[in-house]
Amino acid sequence: MTTVAAYAAPAAKAPLERTTIERRAVGDHDVLLDIKFSGICHSDIHQAQDGWNPGIFPMVPGHEIAGVVTEVGPGVTKFAVGDHVGVGCMVDSCRECDNCKAGLEQYCTGGGPVWTYNSVGKDGEPTYGGYSENIVVDQDFVVRIPKGLPLDAAAPLLCAGITTYSPLKHWNAGPGKKVAVVGLGGLGHMGVKIAHALGAEVTVLSQSLRKKDDGLRLGADHYYATSDPKTFEELAGTFDIILNTVSAPLDFAALLSLLRTDGTLVNVGIPEEEVNISLQSLFGNRRSVSSSGIGGIAETQEMLDFCAEHGLGAEIELISAEEINEAYDRVQASDVRYRFVIDAATI
Ligand code: NAP
Ligand code: ZN
Ligand code: ZN
């Protein structure tokens, strides 16, 4: 065990503060990585504030981790000291269920994956995430960050990148497809970049037009404000895929009216409140409502390689650890352009 500095929420809704945690000794198949950068995902905020389920406290959030390998266990074959690597939302799973075998570890049916934080590992100990100096992770849940991607811009890809890449691939975003991305935040801005790189025609649906210039620069072809009722008249029946990244409940009947026949509304945003969807908004055009959770480990590697090939990183605002609480407030006020990333050297 080693003692490392971290930022933790001591209790639900409490501000995060500097503390120390214990990391396990490097085991046979473990990789120790020196964390360089850690993204702030809105899921960190939902969990630190107990917005979904009762959390495990103290909680060290952070599942967008980019760092450098400093030690490997004797059985490690995939990584060596000095490698640039990342860790996302999961650090283990049963590895035996059909989903794990199919590379869908995020949907593990053998007890669910072990999440990077706010979870209990196979050793019975709580897991602690990326707002810390280092982390020990089984090599099978570590991915390689291609050298062409700067580590700070790569960190958010470990959640925001894969969470948008996976459904865009699954629902065949590409040439000839019209994709709308709802919400231009951390996930949304990566959704725009990735959908554009896949060749789709991309529309941003944001609350207002204040980020329009950014949206178009990131790769959107069109940009509309959902606060303007004309948007819904003009775009009725337009999209093959709507990727909803919003962290709050929306008017789903209005969003569904924008799908063309056989179109799909994929919800990756996870509001804390339950939402109502009227089946009457679906049957007329054989529309679907779906959802998607992050992506498997192999697909996360595929996404990183894709982003490196297309020169896609996150647009980040680099902060020091003592600015985490302020960053949380700004994310909740939709005042993020487009991901806060903690410089782990300041922890
Ligand atoms: P974020 O950076 O805060 O972005 C969310 C965006 O949604 C905001 O920037 C804003 O965009 C829009 N928005 C926020 N509140 C709104 C409201 N009340 N009405 C309408 N639009 C609103 O958050 P994020 O990190 O991208 O995460 C988004 C959601 O995805 C969270 O719920 C998070 O927990 C979830 N998530 C899910 C997965 C998964 O595996 N499914 C993975 C990661 C995160 P505009 O200003 O452009 O309107
Ligand atoms: Zn996340
Ligand atoms: Zn499993």
Image: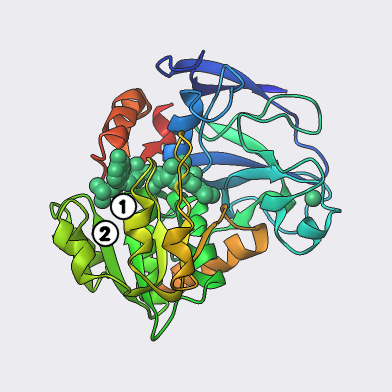
Kind of residue at disc 1 = Gly
Using residue 2 as the reference point, say whether residue 96 is left or right of it. Answer: right
The percent position of residue 248, horizontal first and vertical second, equals 37, 40
Q: Nearer the viewer, residue 170 or 28?
A: 170
Q: Quadrant of the N terminus?
A: top right
Q: Label 2: how many residues lie within 10 Å, few (<14), some (14-19) or many (20+)?
A: many
Using residue 341 as the reference point, say whether residue 7 is left or right of it. Answer: right
Q: Residue at x 67, y 51 (%)?
A: 106
| Residue 40 in the image: above or below residue 195 | above
Residue 205's label in the rendered image is 2
Q: CA distance from mark 2 to mark 1?
A: 6 Å
Q: Quadrant of the C terminus?
A: top left
Q: Does the Cβ of the disc 2 residue fall within 8 Å of ligand 1?
A: yes
Q: Residue at x 65, y 51 (%)?
A: 142
Disc 2 element: strand
Q: Label 1: how many residues lie within 10 Å, few (<14), some (14-19) or many (20+)?
A: many
